[in-house]
Amino acid sequence: MLKTTKPIGFILVSVIAGLAAAYIALKIMQEPTVTFREAPPSPAPANAQSGPFSYAQAVQQARPSVVNVFTSKITIQRRSSLLDDPIFQRFFGNRFHREPKKRLQTSLGSGVIINKDGYILTNHHVIASADEIKVVLSSGRTLQAKVVGTDPDTDLAVVKTETDDLPEITVGNSETLQVGDVVLAIGNPFGVGQTVTMGIVSATGRNQLGINTFENFIQTDAAINPGNSGGALINARGELVGINTAIFSKTGGSQGIGFAIPVDLAKGIMNEILKQGRVVRGWLGITGQDITPELAESFDLQEQSGVLVSRVIEGGAADDAGIELGDVITRIDNRIPSDSREFLNIISAQKPGTEIQIEGWRGKKRFTTEATISERPRVSEGIRPR
């Protein structure tokens, strides 16, 4: 009987080869693989055709409410004092006598329509001493305006036009602003026409800059230039959050440090102006200075809280109450001022005629006195330190 060994060997080889191939395939399938967690797709922006970061809608909403403000006043050029000198008069008499020359002085700024009945918010320095005020709407329409009232201490003013169909701006909330929020400045820089610039909120609560008496500025790097004063600072929703007021610059142009008055402060000032034509604040008649560690050591002060009295106004409430230079005021009624800014705010919030109790240090002795708050003089009114 013949044995068929070759077919069996062939079958065994085929089986072994198949098992080997299956083993290799199984090993490959068991090798670890790397997976990526893909971010969910972002929804397309509503204004995708304008680009993913367009603020055109916000600008379109706000810009009709921003106006150009043009002011003019007549100034008289004074004659030289030399012409009135007795010796000059003896030799020349009235030979050089001429009537004083009149000059028309103009300036420009911006403003924001707060109410459709014609109330416009702007800066005090934009309309100060103006004989005539004109506002030009974004549509090109020109209107006469008159001053309702001003507050030089915050550099705010309210003017009004005789119309009742103006596009009022939507007012936002400046208290919710955060550093890094996008803001846009709308105004009339250098008189070139309505212009929009963009930036972010660089800081909030800026004060002690020497710009205004009462300061609580929004700082922004949105370009603000001469002519922008009184214009709108809006958020990304087109809501008014500030009134552009000043810049820090060594050249006169924008250097990325601009300041705007928060709209929440501006609203309060405007309401007072509309009620009584001016802003009434309490006044004690002193200037306070922050107490630094160096001052505390220099004056041998017992505390570093409160304010150091650096000036006493003659005839003021503090003078009548016996406050002296070098006193340290540590308490007003039940409030403890941490610095001169808080002290100023506490006093200015009091109504004239209010009785307050003052505590402090005079040298190494404590003192207590009472004072009657008077009305704070306006910036233009003279006050004389002792």
Image (cartoon, helix red, strand yellow):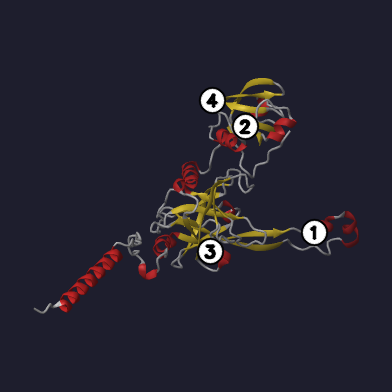
Q: Is residue 278 above or below residue 343?
A: below
Q: Is residue 250 left or right of residue 11?
A: right
Q: Secondary structure at mark 3?
A: loop
Which residue is labeled 1 in the image? Answer: 80
- The residue that disc 4 covers is 334
Residue 186 in picture, x, y percent from top left: 49, 61
Task: Tell me residue 339's x, y (percent).
Answer: 61, 35
Q: Amino acid at mark 1?
A: Ser
SS for callout 1: loop
Which of the marked residues, 2 or 1, is nearer the chain's N terminus?
A: 1
Residue 311 visible here: no
Choose top left, top right, bottom left or bottom right for residue 224.
bottom right
Q: Measured from the top left, where is residue 378 in percent x and y? A: 61, 42
Residue at image point 72% right, 31% down: 297
Residue 125 image point, x, y percent: 59, 53
Sequence order check, earlier mark of 4 and 2: 2
Quarter of the figure that contains the N terminus: bottom left
> Residue at 13% of width from left, 78% of height from top?
4
Packing grade of label 1 (10 A; few <14, some 14-19, many >=20) is few
Marks 4, 3: nearer the viewer: 4
Q: Which residue is mark 2?
A: 284
Disc on res. 188 = 3
Label 2 to label 3: alpha-carbon separation: 39 Å
Earlier-in-chain disc, 4 versus 3: 3
- Viewer-proximal residue, 74 or 249? 249
Task: Name the mark nearer the viewer: 1 or 3.
Answer: 3
Question: Given the image, on which type of amino acid does mark 2 rest?
Answer: Leu
Left of 115 or right of it: where is 218?
Answer: right
C-alpha gap between disc 4 and disc 2: 17 Å
